Image (cartoon, grey):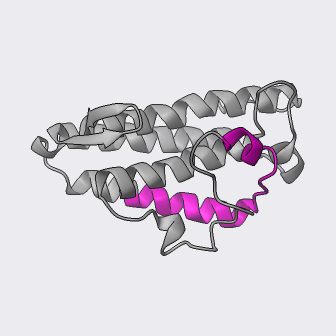
């Protein structure tokens, strides 16, 4: 099995875990504002998906993200996430129209999986600039998979605090 096949499978599993964790979240739960520094479920979910769109399309492919091109105005978000340190403020005011956003999420997932399928194992060693410094394509794609899994945990906790079952398993 090629490294890209293993990586694609890991990313697919992370997508499935995120979606199954987000399943059943209603509008009120998605926008509930927890105390302290935690962010609403909708913002956590949106962060993962828009982040993946940006990582794949901007950092790895060198183009604009889908949210600014083919999905402009159709993501289901009241506003796109900001760059920089205003993320927490955005997270507490953004609104998500769940069905529309989940269509965008599926398109982002398909884009990611198609990108990975287009790579050779050698392509995984290419160096790219990231917000934390130089990384390989493999490292960036690994971060993408872990990011979805990490935020599944946040979403699970936020669901649990609101009285719902968190993780699907």
- In the rendered structure, does residue 136 fall within the stretch colored magenta? no
Q: What stretch of residues is rendered in magenta?
A: 86-111
Q: Quadrant of the C terminus?
A: top right
Residue at x 27% of width, y 34% of height: 134
Is 37 placed left or right of 125 in the picture? right
- In the rendered structure, does residue 101 fall within the stretch colored magenta? yes
Say which of 169 and 33 sits in front.
Answer: 33
Is 169 placed left or right of 123 in the picture? right
**Quadrant of the rendered image containing residue 37:** top right
Residue 112 locus on image (x, y percent): 38, 54
Residue 69 locus on image (x, y percent): 48, 73
Say which of 31 and 130 sits in front.
Answer: 130
Residue at x 56% of width, y 44% of height: 48
Residue 4 locus on image (x, y percent): 22, 42
Answer yes or no: is residue 66 visible.
yes
Residue at x 79% of width, y 33% of height: 159
Q: Quadrant of the N terminus?
A: top left
| Relative height, residue 154 to residue 18 (above, below) | above
Is 99 placed left or right of 110 in the picture? right
Residue at x 35% of width, y 34% of height: 142
Classified by dominant secondary structure, the portion drawn in magenta counts as helix
**Quadrant of the rendered image containing residue 165:** top right
| Relative height, residue 73 to residue 41 (above, below) | below
How many labels sit on residues?
0
Answer yes or no: is residue 23 visible.
no
| Relative height, residue 13 to residue 100 (above, below) | above
Residue 67 locus on image (x, y percent): 53, 65
Is 18 placed left or right of 131 in the picture? right
């Amino acid at each position: 099995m090629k490294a890209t096949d293993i990586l694609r499978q890991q990313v697919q599993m992370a997508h499935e875990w995120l979606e199954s964790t987000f399943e059943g979240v209603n509008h009120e739960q998605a926008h509930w504002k927890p105390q302290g520094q935690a962010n609403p479920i909708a913002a956590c979910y949106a962060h993962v998906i828009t982040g993946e769109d940006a990582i794949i399309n901007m950092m790895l492919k060198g183009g604009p993200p889908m949210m600014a091109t083919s999905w402009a105005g159709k993501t289901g978000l009241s506003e796109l996430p900001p760059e920089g340190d205003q993320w927490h403020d955005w997270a507490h005011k953004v609104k998500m129209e769940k069905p529309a956003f989940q269509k965008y999420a599926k398109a982002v997932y398909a884009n990611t999986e198609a990108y990975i399928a287009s790579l050779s194992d050698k392509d995984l060693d290419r160096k790219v600039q990231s917000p934390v410094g130089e990384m390989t394509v493999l490292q960036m794609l690994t971060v993408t998979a872990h990011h979805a899994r990490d935020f599944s945990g946040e979403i699970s906790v936020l669901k649990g605090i609101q009285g719902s079952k968190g993780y699907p398993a």
